[in-house]
Amino acid sequence: MAKTLQIVTHAYRCTIEEQDDPTVWITHALEGAGADLGVLLRGNAVNSAVQGQDASGLSFGSMVQTQPPRIDRDVAALLAKGIDVYVVSCDARERGLEDASFVEGIKTVERSGVAGLMDQFDRVWSW
């Protein structure tokens, strides 16, 4: 079976309209269908790995998000399914994030190690 690395570069994509990040959601769906996947969070998407996020109370004018995103829980669920989730460590540091703030089980990789990580996969999808 081909192994696929999904690279996510944007944080909170579509979470105003939806309660899920579509890339994290599709990863759950594909894994359920038997896909062999890994996820690399880079750029602003490293924020998705931070534990304890709370978007309750999110509103835009009179529009209230009644089903706020729980991206950290969605990422934790990926890890619980055995999907490796990586964070580019220098991207996290540039945003003031420390490894200790991540959901348990997140793996870090330096930017210089991203090509080597990609080489461990048969396919690479960038979102």
Image (cartoon, grey):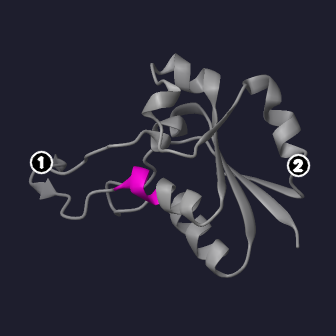
Q: Position of residue 45 (x, y in %)?
A: 53, 40
45, above or below 92, in the image: below
Residue at 88% over, 36% down: 116
* Secondary structure found at label 2: loop
Q: In this view, does 50 lie to the left or right of 7?
A: left
> What residue appears at the point 65 percent right and 59 percent down from the top-left corner?
83
Kind of residue indicated by mark 2: Gln
- Tell me if 38 is positioned left or right of 80 in this view: right
Start and end of the magenta stretch?
70-74
Location of residue 60 with respect to 107 vertically, above or below: below
Q: Can residue 34 be seen in this view?
A: yes
Q: Are marks 2 and 1 in contact (CB under 8 Å)?
A: no
Residue 61: image tag: 1
Residue shown at 59%/67% (left/top)? 81
On whether residue 50 falls in the magenta region, the answer is: no
Residue under label 2? 120
Q: Quadrant of the N terminus?
A: bottom right
Q: Residues within 10 Å of mark 1 (few under 14, many from 20)?
A: few
Residue at 46% in and 37% down: 47
Nearer to the camera, 19 or 96: 96
* Camera sees residue 21: no
From the top left corner, tell me how far across and down residue 62 is, in percent: 9, 54
Q: Residue 123 carries which label?
A: none
Is residue 55 shown above or below 45?
Answer: below
**What's the amino acid at mark 1?**
Gly
Going by the picture, which residue comes out furthest to the left?
A: 62
Labels 2 and 1: the sequence-earlier one: 1
